[in-house]
Amino acid sequence: MTALTENQAREEICRVGQSLFARGYVHATAGNISVRLDDGFLITPTDACLGFLDPARLSKLNLQGEQVSGDRASKTIALHTRIYAAARQFDAHIRCVIHTHSTHCVALTLRDDVTHTTAEPRELLPAVTPYFVMKVGHVPVIDYHRPGAVAAADAVERAILRYGQQGTPIRAVMLSRLGPNVWHDSPASAMATLEELEETARLATLTPAPISPLSQTQLQELRDAFGARW
């Protein structure tokens, strides 16, 4: 996909933010969106409501993470830049990161079977539906750290590298009790990934019994037919 110009990226960040806010994927001033440009980064300002963004006031930073214009950048730019650096080792087209506090994703991390499991690595969801497998893939759960903690960024980077090196690059991580971070080649694609993740989490919270995942045969069919990385 052709990279967006800076002006296009500004408009897309605001369009996606308004769409997510209008449909309840974000609320209040929670969440942030960034785009990697050839000469730096755009990110939503600190404490901004994603439903009411102004393209001209988005924060711009250079490639060293230093702010050059706009309102004060969200503190999560430090995490976003770590995600770009790690994820682009396996897909050079990664250009957008979205973080939200999406309700059903967060709800799953409050359950003992997710937060206290001894499985390693812990994942938010099993292979529940074919489109979750194809469009999202594995979503490792990162242990709780306070917002902005360097330890969380370290853990996210390790997860991205671990999955990428084993041949199953990921498009999302779940920060326990906080929310998902998803990434893709554009704001629209990252939003679609987030939507699929949150709706699959919603299905999981609505299912009272233990979830039966797709079988290995069914997963292999998705790999053969669609190149699913699971």
Image (spheres, rainbow, N blue to C red):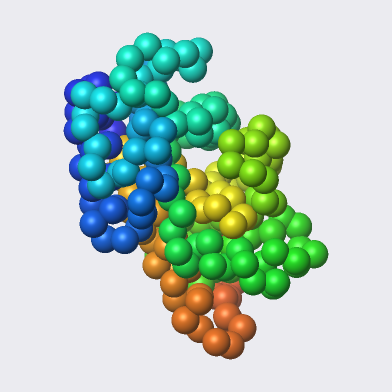
Q: Is residue 143 left or right of residue 63?
A: right
Residue 74 percent coordinates (x, y)? 44, 31
Q: Quadrant of the C terminus?
A: bottom right
Name which residue lies at 64% across and 71% down: 111
Q: Nearer the viewer, residue 120 or 73?
A: 73
Give the x, y percent position of residue 218. Answer: 51, 73
Above or below residue 4? Residue 128 is below
Q: Give the quarter of the image for residue 226.
A: bottom left
Q: Quick check: can you spot residue 132?
A: no
Q: Position of residue 38 (x, y in %)?
A: 36, 16
Front residue of 73 and 13: 73
Q: Where is 114 relative to 41, above or below? A: below
User: In which quadrant is the N terminus drawn?
Assistant: top left
- Residue plotted at (26% across, 25% down): 57
Name the residue located 50 percent from the left edge and 34 percent from the top edge. Answer: 76
Whether 129 is drawn above or below 95: the answer is below
Q: Residue at x 25, y 29 (%)?
A: 9
In the image, residue 147 above or below residue 125: above
